[in-house]
């Protein structure tokens, strides 16, 4: 049986689209659910266009003790955070141990934590005059951007970079690496 992936996203959904494309005709896994906390987000349009079930939730529903059971009823095996801005509750982490994966637009442990997402991260990297940035794919634990690192990829930060130009470099790395890394983790999960 194929492993079922739920993508949690709050924004435009470019990483969600890459994951959907990657697993569209995959032998071992497929994206079967998109969970979003912002009704007008671009990822909701992707779900409609792809014919994937969409679950719109708010913070209270996410924190509800019933939420993990709902995902288990839908037979979800992996949860992939692709720009999801709400903190994952302990009850969900407990129901999906080492099966919740996040991507962060910086080289953790630097530039992570509450409020560190998108342009905030890229601005902080540039202001600190870092020579490189990149992505971190990691397991989710009880703290923001803290779980065990699975994979990192780097890109140079030049003196002429702006938060926008650095974001483009980081997006390239996300789109290049996220789906293949998720695929390797899913394949490891098979007996």
Image: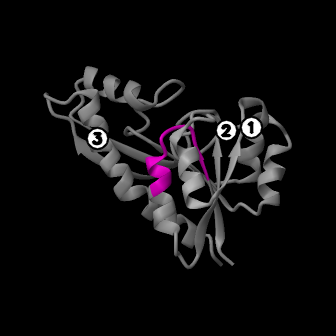
Compared with 12, 164 (above or below) is above
- The picture places residue 169, in percent across and down from the top left corner, at 27, 43
Spatial separation of the CA atoms under disc 2 and disc 1: 8 Å
Compared with 52, 149 (above or below) is above
Mark in front: 2 vs 3: 3
Q: Secondary structure at mark 3?
A: helix
Q: Is residue 153 visible?
A: no
Of residue 169 and residue 92, the one placed in the foreground of this image is: 169
Q: Choose top left, top right, bottom left or bottom right for residue 76.
A: bottom right
Q: Is residue 50 visible?
A: yes
Specify whether residue 14 is painted magenta.
yes
The residue singled out by tag 2 in the image is 88
Q: Earlier in the sequence, mark 2 or mark 3?
A: 2
Q: Is residue 150 left or right of residue 78?
A: left
Specify whether residue 87 is painted magenta.
no
> Residue at horizontal 85%, vertical 40%?
65
Q: Tell me which segment is drawn in magenta.
A: 7-17
**CB within 8 Å, label 2 to label 1:** yes
- The picture places residue 185, in percent across and down from the top left corner, at 54, 65
Count of marks, rendered view? 3
Q: Earlier in the sequence, mark 3 or mark 1?
A: 1
- The picture places residue 78, in percent across and down from the top left corner, at 64, 59
Q: Which mark is residue 168?
A: 3
- The picture places residue 57, in percent across and down from the top left corner, at 72, 38
The residue singled out by tag 1 in the image is 62
């Amino acid at each position: 049986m194929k492993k079922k992936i739920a993508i949690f996203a709050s924004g435009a959904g470019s990483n969600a689209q890459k994951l959907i494309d990657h697993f569209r005709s995959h032998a071992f896994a497929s994206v079967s659910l998109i969970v979003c906390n912002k009704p007008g987000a671009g990822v909701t349009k992707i779900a409609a266009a792809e014919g994937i079930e969409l679950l719109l939730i708010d913070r209270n529903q996410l924190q509800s003790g019933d939420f993990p059971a709902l995902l288990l009823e839908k037979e979800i095996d992996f949860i992939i955070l692709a720009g999801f801005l709400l903190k994952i509750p302990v009850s969900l982490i407990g129901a999906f141990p080492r099966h919740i994966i996040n991507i962060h637009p910086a080289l953790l442990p630097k530039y992570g934590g509450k409020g560190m997402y998108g342009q905030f991260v890229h601005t902080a990297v540039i202001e600190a005059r870092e020579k490189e940035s990149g992505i971190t794919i990691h397991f989710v634990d009880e703290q923001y951007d803290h779980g065990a690192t699975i994979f990192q990829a780097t890109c140079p930060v030049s003196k002429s970079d702006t938060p926008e130009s650095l974001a483009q470099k980081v997006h390239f790395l996300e789109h290049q690496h996220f789906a293949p890394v998720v695929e390797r983790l899913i394949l490891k999960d098979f007996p």
